[in-house]
Amino acid sequence: MFLGVTSRSARGISAAVALLAIGAVGCSDAIDSATAGAKKVVRQRSVFSLTPGDCYNPNSGATESEEFSVEIVPCEEAHEGQVVGEFSIEGESKYPGDEGASKIADEQCPAESLKFISDTWAVPEGVELFYYYPTAESWATGDRSVSCTYAKETGTFTDSLKNESLNADQLAYLKGANAVYEALWANQPKAEQIEDDLDGYKKQAKAVSTALDAHLANLKGIVKPETVKLTEQLEKAAGSWKDAASAADTDAFYIAYDVAFTGIDPNKTVGARKELKLATTVPADDAEVWAG
């Protein structure tokens, strides 16, 4: 569900002079090009020193396999990406390999990004979750850091993805809603068929049920028509998630899960979101999942 991988390398930054090549152009164009190139050089920063909030343009493309440095730009300017979270890989005595490091980033970046972006529905179209993670070479030098970013494969976007003007009701809703969907995806069993891992699916249902209870507690403080309607709908869904978590067998799980999963269809939250003045366009990935 969370697309895109960009690894980083311990190798040095390419020579800055390469950024200043201007070719056979007129004098005025040459000066403009050189000025732009010089600005880009000054803005270069190693991928090892990125921090949440940094807006940037990758030097080799958002989806290239390795990146050494990026151009840091003011978020008000057009840019291809923004760093939205970071964490250190722990509990690994040796390099887990590109696949292992990528898997760790893939599992943890969604949760880390939610600490920065309260409403993922407000993320511009085409902007997806990517991450920079250690290579074997950088791991050997002590690198354990993962930088989680939202980036656009083609084109740019402007302004920071962080929304700092949300009111108490908006924050209460988003905190609970984010936790519910994070519990669903973070606990997704590897087995595609419930019959192959009933315990795993019951564990997922338990996690969603717990998150839903907390979400409902937050929603009870918001007395608005559409939000009250959503609360009633989610209360029914919460009961079904509890039934799924305690299902005695596969058949019982299927019966409960069908109602439970349908009950948290994000399309059913649009009315409440509109009422709370939040983004109302269901992300394409989510819309596809619940479309069946």
Image (cartoon, rainbow, N blue to C red):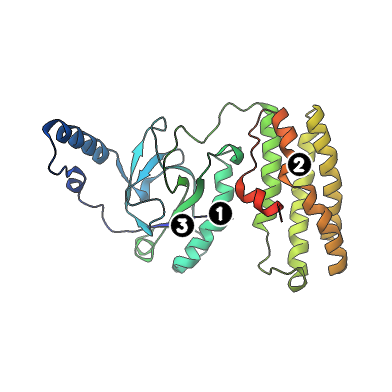
The residue located at (48%, 34%) in the rendering is 160
The residue located at (55%, 47%) in the rendering is 112
User: Image quadrant of residue 11?
Assistant: bottom left
Per the image, the residue denoted by label 2 is 268
The residue located at (77%, 46%) in the rendering is 212
Q: Amino acid at mark 2?
A: Lys
Q: Position of residue 182 (x, y in %)?
A: 66, 50
Label 1, label 3: how far apart the Cα atoms are: 9 Å
Q: Position of residue 232 (x, y in %)?
A: 85, 39
- Could you tell me which secondary element the residue under label 1 belongs to? loop
119 is higher (above) or lower (below) than 13: above
Q: Position of residue 237 (x, y in %)?
A: 83, 48
Per the image, the residue denoted by label 3 is 5
Q: Amino acid at mark 3?
A: Val
Tell me, for residue 2, which label it has, or none: 1
134 or 290: which is nearer to us? Answer: 290
The N terminus: image quadrant: bottom right
291 or 1: which is nearer to us? Answer: 291
Label 2, label 3: how far apart the Cα atoms are: 31 Å
Question: Could you tell whether 43 is left or right of 215 in the image?
Answer: left
